[in-house]
């Protein structure tokens, strides 16, 4: 097993009588992406704040890159990059100037700062806009620049706190591509998000928090497999909808009706041929048949219905 870049054991945080985190444990290996999901107030930002040494836990332990976040906070900060929900760049300066300024603040010499800035501008597709003021950038460009700033120190671990909030679909996809590339190059990424598609696309493992506790944890595939099977959606003529529903019920299938579309939970691979046969025997023509896998949306809704999120 590869050494963990992040190791958390029984982590807790209380503010008086309020429990923000309760007995949270996790392990994140190098080059992997952990997606942290949860409603506002679930504990996502509290967890990130502890791991980035902004606040201290009340109980438990946490290490980042082998360093304890309480006893060796300075060492932790040298190993990480952070992109919060709000851009940290100065809009009155150009993209290049922002990168040069932050690089110099991190201790880089002038030539090193210029080389690193040029490298990151190219990596995030900002070279042509490098000498424009950030105030003229689109939302997606600003977020990419913010991400570039967080990578100036070549961090081993990158924390992204809802980085695509407010972005349009195109900008969000561009940022996803950047994050995936960073993970492929060996950077460990912790991503908090309220976009389930984002976690499904990027995360190797997903952790769902509710009221400060972990209510679900595993790979996206494991979480989706845990809530049930695939679903077949059958579209028939409106005049055949009621007969189709009865035919499928007689075949022992679980059916939900949506106008002239019927959803059937598939327990086994043989259920699809059985579904087609049942409708054929009833003399009902199938207009459309679609098979869908469970999604993280389904997982989240199932947890919410059960009081878990």
Image (cartoon, helix red, strand yellow):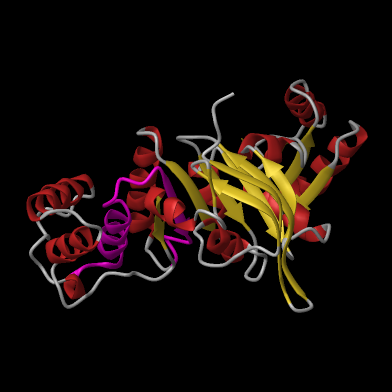
Q: Quadrant of residue 69?
A: bottom right
Q: Is residue 188 above or below residue 173?
A: above
- Residue at 30 percent of width and 67 percent of height: 139
In the picture, measured across the screen, residue 239 lies left or right of residue 157, that is right
In the picture, measured across the screen, residue 27 lies left or right of residue 150, that is right
In the picture, measured across the screen, residue 210 lies left or right of residue 144, that is right
Q: Position of residue 141 (x, y in %)?
A: 25, 61
Q: Is residue 279 above or below residue 27?
A: above
Q: Which residues are magenta?
A: 137-165
Q: Position of residue 240 (x, y in %)?
A: 76, 45
Q: Position of residue 303 (x, y in %)?
A: 76, 54
Query: Is 160 included in the stretch rendered in magenta?
Result: yes
Q: Position of residue 167 (x, y in %)?
A: 38, 64
Q: Quadrant of residue 128?
A: bottom left
Q: Nearer the viewer, residue 252 or 115?
A: 115
Q: Nearer the viewer, residue 32 or 234?
A: 32
In the picture, measured across the screen, residue 238 lies left or right of residue 145, that is right
Q: Nearer the viewer, residue 137 or 6?
A: 6
- Residue at 54 percent of width and 64 percent of height: 49
Residue 260 visible within the image: no
Q: Is residue 216 above or below residue 85?
A: above
Q: Nearer the viewer, residue 130 or 118?
A: 118
Q: Quadrant of the C terminus?
A: bottom right
Residue 117 visible within the image: yes
Q: Is residue 142 above or below residue 215?
A: below
Q: Quadrant of the N terminus?
A: top right
């Amino acid at each position: 097993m590869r050494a963990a870049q992040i190791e958390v054991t029984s982590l807790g945080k209380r503010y008086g009588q309020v429990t923000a985190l309760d007995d949270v444990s996790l392990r994140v290996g190098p080059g992997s992406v952990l997606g942290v999901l949860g409603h506002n107030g679930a504990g996502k930002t509290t967890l990130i704040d502890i791991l980035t040494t902004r606040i201290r836990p009340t109980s438990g332990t946490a290490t980042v890159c082998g360093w304890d976040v309480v006893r060796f906070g300075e060492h932790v900060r040298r190993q990480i990059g952070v992109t919060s929900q709000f851009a940290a760049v100065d809009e009155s300066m150009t993209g290049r100037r922002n990168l040069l300024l932050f690089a110099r603040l991190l201790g880089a010499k002038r030539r090193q700062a210029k080389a690193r800035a040029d490298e990151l501008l190219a990596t995030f597709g900002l070279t042509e806009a490098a000498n424009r003021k950030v105030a003229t950038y689109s939302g997606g460009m600003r977020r990419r620049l913010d991400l570039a700033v967080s990578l100036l120190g070549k961090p081993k671990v990158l924390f992204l706190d809802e980085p695509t909030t407010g972005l349009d679909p195109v900008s969000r996809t561009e940022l996803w591509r950047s994050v995936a590339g960073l993970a492929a190059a060996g950077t460990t990424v912790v991503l908090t998000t309220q976009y389930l598609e984002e976690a499904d696309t990027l995360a190797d493992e997903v952790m769902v928090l509710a009221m400060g506790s972990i209510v679900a944890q595993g790979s996206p595939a494991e979480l989706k497999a845990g809530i049930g099977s695939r679903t077949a959606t059958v579209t028939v003529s409106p005049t055949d909808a009621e007969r189709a529903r009865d035919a499928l019920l007689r075949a022992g299938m679980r059916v939900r009706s949506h106008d002239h579309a019927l959803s059937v939970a598939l327990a086994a691979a043989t259920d699809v041929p059985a579904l087609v046969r049942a409708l054929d025997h009833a003399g009902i023509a199938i207009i459309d048949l679609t098979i869908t896998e469970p999604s993280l949306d389904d997982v989240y809704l199932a947890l919410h219905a059960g009081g878990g999120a």
